[in-house]
Image (cartoon, rainbow, N blue to C red):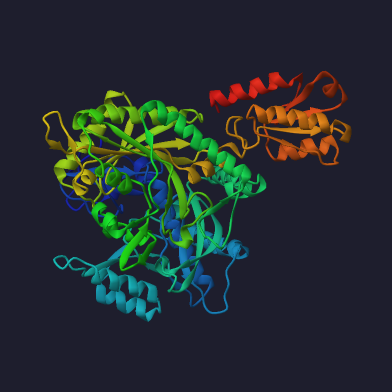
């Protein structure tokens, strides 16, 4: 038999050869490094037999898939260690996740596991790693697997198998399941896995959390143990260092310390914005308007609650209802809007439009609500109540290319003001979607054409488009190396069909417009949370909730200090006065902790000269200058909108 390598080379192999055989045939070094194999694009165990003509790629620690594979291996080692240490524990699931892995357990009554137990568990894990236990796959009948896990009193595995059988396609029933064994531990698992536990070079258990079985609050609360793993101790140490830095920058802690926002159990997943945070919010919304207005966007305001018929028309009632807050009034089903697009489509349909008016560009920083599970809520990053710098464009087919290019320009301009480098991703049709294949072909082709005409490098994310259309997503990397998906441009032929949108063309006939969904920053909440962590709460002058604070040295300087504050406020500088009976050194220290860009110290000399002594956050004294000169400086920095 033969296999085709990534460079096009044909590799001759014996019939029945495995991925391990292929790696050995290529070279002894590759055989030692091999972790798994990709066969026709699908990840497989090294022990999996190959077929004639297979497209083959050997996975090594330098491969994109390697860390996920390693972390899956380590999750099984964690489960093996926990079973060793806690007889009677029931095991659930243990997948790799971004930056690590977890495993869910139901411990025997009276047993509580905390991070104080990690050292003991890690020591047992190291024993399994040192033993170089092989990961052995076995495909067994459903009946045999059920009998085994019933005998071992593992009800979660039994339920998973039963659900696999129940949810299988009638024409393709599940008759066998795969089990993986390392040492004494056997788990229900699809795989794949690495060759053995000794490939796990560095790992760390990190935290414990509660997790309902299958995310259902009516089911058992399990204990979830999180960890991470790497191929070297240096990589693990660097990752843990980044995590420590992330803790220092945690937007929830800084939001509280900087008096920006708070959360309350009276409205889970919804921020209560304090005056400083509201100022920050308003600055971003004002910036959005400044970017939109010269580009021809018209701001609109639509209701919070719509009749279910609108959501049925859009398709959200069937595909998104579990994430919507639904209510009932006067024999009508109603839902709080989780996005603006159906309301904007309805608004466009309610008026008669000529081709001369197109494109119509609606923007709305409207409030949205999504019924996110409580266990997924996370500060400003995952909320139930939020707003987006949202916009929708209705245009002719001929205008699509120009509008998409204009959206790209707006998003690059917007995110560039914050100093971000931007990566672009084209997400194509998902499995669950609406609209015809012809619509999707046309939409994906137009987005590709716009990207390529602008000379933009992009990667393709197959199957991750919105259910109504493909999209271009924009990713930025923050100051500690984390990637964030922010802006998006989505091309939609489905909504205009579903809402029966029309405009009157030059031929005096009705035609169907095309709809473009666009956001530059995305959710304001998430964007602010990301900015807090990116800058560690040290906002540029134009965005800082408090741009300057006036610090009189003694009570006799208070009147002049208040006069300076009045001058700054008249020039729309965001300023506060610290007239506490504290030393000026204490006032400066507190202002530094509050990360206020400018401190204006006022003593006898400044009062007599009509000046202020300027201090810059982190940089110290910059000398004295007239108040008007300082005002001009802040106004200039604000107008430039530079990071």
Q: Position of residue 552 (x, y in %)?
A: 82, 32
Q: Nearer the viewer, residue 635 or 463?
A: 635
**Residue drawn at (36%, 28%), measured in percent from left and top?**
296
Of residues 123 and 366, the one nearer the viewer is 366
**Can the viewer see residue 407?**
yes
Nearer to me, 594 or 463:
594
Task: Residue 457: give x, y in percent of width and height.
Answer: 33, 28
Q: Is residue 25 visible?
A: no
Q: Quadrant of residue 582?
A: top right
Q: Nearer the viewer, residue 365 or 51?
A: 365
Left or right, 319 with reference to 81: left
Rendering coords of residue 321 (x, y %): 32, 60
Q: Quadrant of residue 553?
A: top right
Count how many numbered circles sit on residues in the image.
Answer: 0
Please give the name of the residue rendered at 63% of the width and 64% of the height, measured from the top-left corner: 116
Quadrant where the image shows the C terminus: top right
Residue 451 place in picture, x, y as percent: 29, 29
Q: Is residue 327 above or below residue 432?
A: below
- Relative placement, left or right, of 261 versus 439 is right
């Amino acid at each position: 038999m033969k296999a085709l390598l990534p460079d096009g080379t044909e590799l001759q192999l014996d019939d029945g050869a495995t991925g391990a055989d292929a790696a050995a045939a290529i070279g002894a070094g590759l055989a030692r490094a091999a972790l798994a194999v990709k066969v026709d694009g699908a990840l497989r165990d090294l022990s999996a037999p190959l077929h004639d003509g297979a497209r083959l790629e050997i996975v090594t620690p330098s491969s994109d898939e390697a860390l996920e594979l390693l972390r899956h291996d380590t999750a099984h080692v964690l489960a093996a260690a926990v079973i060793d240490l806690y007889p009677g524990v029931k095991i659930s699931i243990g997948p790799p996740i971004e930056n690590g892995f977890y495993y869910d357990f139901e411990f025997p009554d009276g047993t509580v596991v905390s991070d104080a137990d990690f050292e003991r568990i890690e020591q047992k894990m190291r024993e399994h790693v040192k033993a170089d236990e092989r990961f052995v796959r076995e495909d067994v009948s459903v009946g045999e697997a059920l009998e085994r896990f019933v005998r071992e009193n593992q009800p979660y595995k039994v339920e998973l198998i039963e659900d696999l059988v129940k949810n299988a396609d009638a024409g393709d029933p599940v008759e066998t399941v795969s089990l993986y064994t390392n040492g004494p531990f056997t788990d229900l698992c699809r795989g794949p896995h690495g060759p053995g536990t000794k490939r796990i070079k560095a790992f760390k258990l990190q935290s414990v959390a509660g997790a309902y079985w299958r995310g259902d609050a009516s089911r058992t609360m399990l204990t979830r143990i999180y960890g991470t793993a790497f191929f070297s101790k240096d990589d693990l140490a660097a990752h843990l260092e980044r995590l420590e830095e992330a803790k220092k920058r945690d937007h929830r802690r800084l939001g509280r310390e900087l008096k920006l926002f708070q959360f309350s159990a009276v409205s889970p997943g919804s921020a209560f914005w304090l005056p400083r945070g509201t100022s920050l919010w308003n600055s971003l919304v004002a910036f959005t308007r400044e970017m939109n207005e010269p580009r021809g966007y018209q701001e609109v305001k639509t209701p919070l609650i719509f009749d279910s018929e609108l959501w049925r028309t859009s398709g959200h009632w069937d595909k998104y209802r579990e994430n919507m807050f639904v209510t009932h009034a006067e024999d009508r089903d109603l839902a709080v809007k989780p996005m603006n697009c159906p309301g904007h489509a309805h608004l466009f349909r309610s008026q008669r439009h000529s081709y001369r008016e197109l494109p119509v560009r609606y923007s709305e920083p409207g409030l949205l609500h999504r019924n996110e599970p409580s266990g997924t809520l996370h500060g400003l990053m995952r909320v139930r109540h939020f707003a987006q710098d949202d916009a929708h464009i209705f245009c002719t087919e001929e205008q699509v290319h120009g509008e998409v290019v204009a959206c790209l320009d707006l998003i690059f301009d917007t995110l560039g003001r914050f100093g971000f480098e931007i990566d672009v991703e084209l997400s194509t049709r998902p499995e669950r979607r609406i609209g015809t294949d012809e619509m999707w072909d046309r939409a994906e082709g137009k987005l590709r054409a716009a990207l390529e005409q602008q000379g933009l490098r992009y990667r393709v994310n197959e199957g991750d488009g919105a259910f109504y259309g493909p999209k271009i997503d924009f990713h930025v990397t923050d100051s500690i190396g984390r990637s964030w998906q922010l802006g998006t441009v989505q091309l939609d032929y489905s909504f205009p069909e579903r809402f029966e949108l029309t405009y009157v063309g030059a031929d005096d006939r009705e035609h169907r417009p095309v709809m473009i969904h666009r956001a530059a920053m995305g959710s304001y909440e998430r964007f602010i949370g990301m900015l807090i962590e990116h800058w560690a709460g040290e906002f540029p002058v134009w965005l800082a909730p408090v741009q300057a604070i006036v610090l009189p040295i003694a009570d006799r300087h208070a009147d002049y200090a208040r006069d300076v504050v009045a001058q700054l406020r008249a020039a729309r500088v965001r300023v506060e006065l610290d007239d506490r009976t504290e030393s000026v050194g204490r006032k400066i220290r507190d202002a530094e902790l509050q990360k206020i860009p400018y401190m204006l110290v006022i003593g006898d000399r400044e009062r007599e000269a009509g000046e202020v002594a300027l201090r810059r956050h982190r940089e110290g004294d910059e000398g004295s200058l007239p108040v008007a000169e300082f005002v001009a400086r802040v106004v200039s920095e604000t107008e430039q909108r530079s990071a």
